[in-house]
Image (cartoon, rainbow, N blue to C red):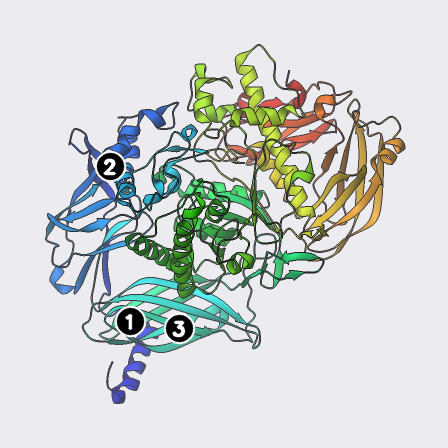
């Protein structure tokens, strides 16, 4: 820092340089080492080019040395790839004069996973954490022409060795269930946990450089992390920004400078002197936003705009070095509200965004591919837009996958999709030795610094289900030894991860696990006796044996963060990775693809409760009909459960209720196989996703029966109270005309709530409608009002459809015409058709509605293609199915 007497002239000089945009000497030289590298296996018998970012599997596939890893049984056939040790190498020329720079670094944003880094035959160090950023000082190593090798060690062998070296006690689970066909000891390696297999995905423990790798050269200092968090001071009613900048300072003495922050749209320009100390130096700035400026907040989807402001931050360092950072800043507050509820034991568990309680509607996100270099911008946009199109406002990034790429969070910021962000620990206990904890602390620090500027992220969560694993003793640990594992749990998630999060980011809450009991868990020493207690926190719930149409089986939880049912993906998706001999429900392929024990049987058992199962003699037709029926059953089951959670948001019954979140498991698929997903691998919508578009609608009537009484609740995410008309009809299965229709006018729907708006004993309703019985009629209903204010049409089945009386097989026809960039389908029927399903085969796109109950003779559906196509191609690919086709 200059002497006191010289500071003011220097600051004025630096300020004028910053405002004038003077460049000064270059602050940084950078170039990427992305592109083609040389890839070789352990004994050198295979040598090929491999892309960076990339992995050994995709390199082998690109060269035609292996088939699609997802084809048939290739997940087993290609295990040798993960068991080998691969090396990435290349030469590169130095594009600058090294002597002009004080420091030259080699930066890896992501190495998967265990590797030794060697430059010019000098070992720089090792990596063992897929989720950390690695930087190596190569100032004294770099030459005019250089060689670099990244020697990988099989993740499978490494994990096994780490487990073996953990002599004191076993850390369970040692291996996944056999049905998952996976690898062991994944909890001993900081790598994508599901890459060793999961109950919805294959085992492909990859090796490769999965993110950017580059050379950076700089003098004096270099900006490594830059983040912005907004804060609102209620007392003063003022917004401020906290800007944090982390530098690597290579000067041997403190370096002075000036930082200017400019947000033109908010009339904000602020300058401040800074001093950077040698080594790692962090600068925190507080920027107050004038109260007189009209500032717009960032809102979740469906509740307002996702307004952001352009901010320029310029650092002018002594010597005239200039570092400029252009970023987007957002203003929003988030609170996790846990407070007493009148008439109920326990505490609430809900989120307030900008002071408004928000009902969370969404799903759980898993990795979009086993091979991360195949996850493109196009794929992310497609999947996330599909979530938005289904009226979702939140996704939970599940803790057994990866911290997603920057673009994922950028898109969520833009779409208004909130993110519940797990840290990458799932369904296991983990070691707590010092080297493991050090690696985790580095990982968490990096990820929080990288991600905390995103307004979409509203919560950090320590892990997936590990509190429950201890509380319910999933791994049959002897009681005398349980305290050891409990201590490790608290050490990892509280004394390490929580400590890092609180130090790095105070702008959003942290919970140690999901499910958890919130404050009750804290009071019980961070491990609750029953993390599934419906009076606290969030809940995961799965039940495949009970009748999913029976709403009384579902927990009236404060927040449902996981629940679901399986289905099979469409035949067109499966056909890409199978052959003709695989196309039956009991084929070796179908059994191999199912990674959830008894999953295929459970789907049919659940379907058989309410539908007739396929009994045809044609194997392929039977297989297609079974696929269809699993999708119908999944969609109907999750509809029943989600509507139960949505109507439970405003009431307490038996001390339970005030449910403020419904996140079904899961949104997307990692490969083509049976799973809980609503989007197939590649993004095609299952029937469930079309159902989600309706059951997550901002305005929705939902029905249920209780003790012989029929209820309809009005559910609203709107910000204003509205007065609407409720129309209720009873349709005989045998007629296109309703038996009777009731219009109830002046129905008051309160903003952000759910309440009963219709109540009538079922017997009275049936009596009023002439010849209707439970078996012969179905109830439909919807809300309508002035302007565009209306709800989707909903329905309530009065009996199982296998018992329906009068249900006829309709003659369904469709005519297609092109209208600009989409297609209009005119659908006609001769009889009521339940669960009408339009499938465009291999033509990618979405329908305006699908999987619906068709009660009118003609209906217009729009098809929005994702790629250019024509009427003839669509006609050729389109198939129509309804429930009565199943025989």
Q: What is the number of the mark on residue 22? A: 1
In percent of the image, x 22 and y 37: which residue is there?
Answer: 86
Res. 816 in view: no
* Residue position marked by numbered label 2 in the rendering: 50
Would you say the residues marked 2 and 3 are in contact, meaning their CB atoms lie under 8 Å apart?
A: no
Q: How crowded is mark 1: few (under 14 residues within 10 Å), some or many (20 or more)?
A: some
Q: Which residue lies furthest to the bottom in this view?
A: 5
Residue 451 percent coordinates (x, y): 41, 56
- Secondary structure state at the residue bearing disc 3: strand
* Residue position marked by numbered label 3 in the rendering: 285
- Secondary structure state at the residue bearing disc 2: strand
- Secondary structure state at the residue bearing disc 1: loop
Mark 2 or 3 closer to N-term? Answer: 2
Residue 157 percent coordinates (x, y): 26, 37
Looking at the rendering, in which quadrant would you find the C terminus?
A: top right
Q: Residues within 10 Å of mark 3 (few under 14, many from 20)?
A: some
Residue 5 percent coordinates (x, y): 26, 89
Mark whose residue sits in front, 3 or 1: 3
């Amino acid at each position: 820092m200059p002497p006191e007497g010289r500071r003011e002239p220097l600051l004025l000089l630096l300020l004028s340089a910053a405002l004038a945009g003077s460049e000064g000497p270059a602050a940084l030289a950078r170039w990427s080492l992305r592109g083609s590298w040389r890839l070789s296996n352990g004994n050198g018998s295979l040598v090929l080019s491999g892309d960076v970012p990339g992995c050994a599997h995709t390199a082998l596939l690109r060269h035609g040395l292996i088939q699609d890893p997802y084809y048939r049984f290739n997940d087993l056939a290609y295990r040798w790839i993960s068991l080998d040790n691969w090396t990435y190498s290349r030469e590169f020329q130095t594009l600058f004069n090294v002597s002009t720079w004080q420091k030259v670094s080699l930066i890896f944003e992501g190495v998967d996973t265990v590797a030794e880094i060697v430059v010019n035959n000098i070992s720089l160090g090792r990596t063992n954490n897929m989720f950390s950023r690695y930087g190596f000082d190569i100032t004294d190593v770099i030459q005019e022409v250089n060689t670099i090798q990244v020697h990988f060690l099989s993740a499978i062998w490494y994990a096994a060795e780490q487990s073996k070296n953990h002599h004191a006690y076993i850390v369970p689970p040692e291996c996944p269930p056999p049905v998952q066909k996976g690898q062991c000891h994944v909890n001993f390696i900081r790598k994508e946990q599901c890459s060793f297999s999961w109950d919805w995905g294959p085992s492909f423990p990859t090796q490769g450089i999965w993110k950017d790798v580059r050379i950076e050269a700089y003098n004096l200092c270099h900006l490594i992390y830059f983040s912005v968090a907004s804060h609102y001071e209620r007392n003063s009613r003022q917004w401020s920004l906290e800007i944090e900048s982390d530098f690597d300072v290579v000067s041997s003495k403190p370096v002075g400078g000036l930082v200017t922050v400019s947000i033109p749209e908010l009339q904000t320009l602020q300058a401040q002197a800074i001093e950077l100390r040698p080594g790692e130096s962090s600068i925190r700035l507080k920027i107050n936003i004038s109260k007189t400026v009209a500032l717009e907040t960032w809102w979740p989807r469906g509740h307002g705009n996702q307004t952001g402001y352009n901010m320029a931050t310029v650092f002018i360092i002594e010597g005239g070095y200039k570092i400029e950072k252009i970023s987007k800043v957002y203003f929003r507050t988030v609170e996790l509200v846990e407070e007493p509820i009148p008439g109920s034991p326990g505490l609430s568990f809900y989120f307030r965004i900008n002071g408004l309680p928000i009902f969370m509607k969404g799903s759980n996100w898993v990795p979009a591919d086993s091979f991360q270099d195949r996850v493109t911008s196009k794929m992310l946009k497609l999947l996330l837009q599909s979530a938005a199109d289904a009226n979702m406002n939140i996704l939970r990034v599940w803790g057994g996958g990866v911290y997603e790429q920057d673009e994922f969070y950028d898109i969520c910021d833009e779409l208004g999709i909130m993110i519940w962000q797990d840290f990458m620990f799932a369904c296991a206990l983990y070691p707590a030795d010092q080297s493991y904890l050090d690696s985790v602390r580095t990982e968490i620090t990096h990820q929080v610094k990288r991600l905390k500027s995103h307004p979409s992220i509203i919560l950090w969560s320590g892990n997936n289900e590990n509190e429950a694993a201890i509380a319910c003793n999933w791994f049959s640990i002897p009681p005398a030894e349980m305290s050891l594992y409990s201590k490790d749990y608290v050490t990892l998630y509280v004394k390490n991860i929580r400590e890092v999060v609180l130090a790095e980011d105070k702008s959003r809450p942290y919970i140690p696990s999901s499910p958890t009991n919130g404050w009750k868990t804290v009071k019980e020493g961070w491990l609750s006796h029953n993390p599934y207690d419906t009076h606290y926190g969030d809940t995961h719930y799965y039940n495949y044996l009970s009748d999913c149409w029976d709403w009384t089986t579902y927990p009236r939880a404060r927040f449902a963060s996981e629940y679901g049912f399986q289905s099979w993906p469409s035949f067109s998706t499966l056909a890409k990775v199978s052959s003709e001999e695989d196309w039956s429900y009991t084929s070796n392929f179908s059994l191999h693809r199912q990674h959830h024990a008894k999953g295929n049987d459970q789907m049919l058992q659940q379907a058989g409760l309410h539908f007739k199962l396929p009994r045809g003699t044609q194997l392929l037709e039977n297989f297609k009909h079974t696929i269809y029926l699993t999708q119908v059953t999944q969609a109907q089951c999750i509809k029943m459960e989600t509507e139960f959670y949505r109507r439970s948001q405003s009431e307490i019954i038996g001390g339970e209720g005030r449910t403020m979140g419904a996140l079904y498991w899961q949104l997307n698929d990692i490969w083509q196989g049976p799973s809980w997903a609503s989007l197939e691998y590649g993004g095609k919508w299952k029937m469930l996703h079309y159902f989600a578009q309706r059951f997550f609608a901002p305005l929705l009537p939902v029905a249920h029966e209780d003790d012989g009484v029929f209820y309809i609740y009005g559910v609203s995410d709107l910000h204003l109270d509205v007065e609407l008309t409720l129309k209720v009809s009873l349709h005989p299965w045998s007629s296109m005309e309703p038996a009777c229709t009731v219009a109830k006018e002046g129905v008051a729907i309160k903003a952000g709530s759910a309440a009963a708006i219709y109540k009538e004993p079922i017997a009275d309703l049936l009596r009023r409608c002439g010849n209707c019985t439970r078996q012969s009629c179905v109830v439909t209903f919807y809300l309508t009002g002035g302007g565009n204010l209306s709800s989707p049409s909903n329905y309530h089945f009065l009996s199982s459809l296998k018992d329906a009386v009068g249900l006829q097989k309709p003659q369904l026809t469709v005519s297609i015409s092109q209208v600009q960039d989409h297609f209009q389908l005119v659908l006609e029927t001769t009889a009521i058709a339940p669960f009408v399903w339009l499938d465009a085969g291999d033509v990618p796109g979405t329908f305006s509605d699908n999987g619906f109950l068709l009660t009118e003779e003609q209906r217009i559906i729009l098809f929005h293609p994702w790629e250019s196509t024509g009427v003839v191609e669509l006609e050729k690919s389109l198939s129509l199915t309804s429930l009565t086709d199943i025989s």
